[in-house]
């Protein structure tokens, strides 16, 4: 009886380990991750619109009161990424994700100077170079250091009701992802 109980416990623990391993490896092995879906919508550094739960959106947003935009980047291929956008949205937030979708950094309009999005993403070596001679374009930027040179930037803007549609659309249309 105890032998059967031990075998049963071993089977349950083994199944749990396999289940957890599959869940953790799924983003790595998936061909339809956020990176791949954004790649079908635009090139590196090209802003792509993200819609609240809409079928066919490359990266659907969970909250219908938010609209968004995102762009993929490769710091080794194009250098430091400078992400900017105008002001005007009632609230916005930005998140930087690595190639596999892990959130590396997030902030919102309350953190940014003047409520304007001005973000520079670079590797450690690129930041060292920037500190030697900082370009004027990056003087007011928030700097994010990343280990993985490939990633995704997602900007979300709050649209409290339909009357804010044009303001939010203008803000999202002003998003630029450029190499420095």
Image (tube, rainbow, N blue to C red):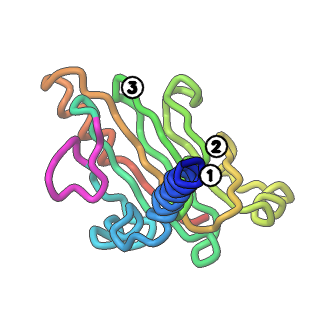
**Left or right of 76: which side holds 64?**
left
Query: Callout 2: helix, strand or loop?
Result: loop
Disc number placed over residue 170 in the picture, else none: none
| Label 2–label 1 contact, CB within 8 A | yes
Along the line of sight, the residue nearer the viewer: 84 or 11: 11
The span from disc 1 to disc 3 (Cα, nearest Å) is 20 Å
**Left or right of 21: which side holds 48?**
left
- Is 87 placed above or below 39 here? above
Q: How many labels does the image show?
A: 3
Instruction: Tell me where residue 79 appears, x and y as whole percent.
Output: 63, 70
Q: Residue at x 20, y 25 (%)?
A: 164
Query: Callout 3: helix, strand or loop?
Result: loop
Q: Can residue 20 be seen in this view?
A: no
Q: Which residue is drawn at 65% across and 41% down?
A: 142
List the residue tagged with mark 3. Answer: 91
Closer to the chain start, of discs 1 and 3, is: 3
Q: Magenta segment range?
A: 51-62
Question: For mark 3, does the 10 Å Cα neighbourhood hold few (<14), some (14 to 19), or many (20 or more) residues?
Answer: some
List the residue tagged with mark 2. Answer: 141
Would you identify the image quadrant in which residue 61 lies?
Answer: top left
Closer to the chain start, of discs 2 and 3, is: 3
Instruction: Tell me where residue 4 appears, x and y as whole percent.
Output: 52, 54
């Amino acid at each position: 009886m105890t032998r059967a109980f031990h075998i049963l416990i071993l089977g349950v623990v083994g199944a749990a380990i396999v289940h957890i391993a599959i869940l953790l490896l799924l983003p790595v092995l998936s061909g339809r991750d956020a990176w791949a879906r954004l790649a079908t919508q635009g090139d590196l550094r090209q802003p792509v619109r993200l819609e609240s739960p809409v079928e066919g959106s490359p990266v659907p947003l969970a909250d219908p009161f938010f609209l968004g935009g995102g762009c993929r980047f490769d710091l080794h291929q194009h250098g430091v990424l400078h992400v900017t956008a105008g002001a005007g949205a009632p609230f916005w937030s930005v998140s930087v994700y690595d190639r596999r979708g892990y959130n590396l950094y997030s902030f919102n309009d309350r953190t940014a100077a003047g409520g304007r999005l001005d973000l520079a993403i670079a590797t450690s070596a690129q930041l060292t170079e920037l500190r030697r001679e900082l370009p004027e374009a990056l003087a007011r930027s928030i700097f994010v250091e990343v280990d993985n040179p490939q990633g995704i930037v997602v900007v979300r803007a709050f649209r409290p009701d339909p009357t804010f549609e044009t303001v939010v659309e203008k803000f999202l249309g002003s998003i630029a992802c450029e190499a420095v």
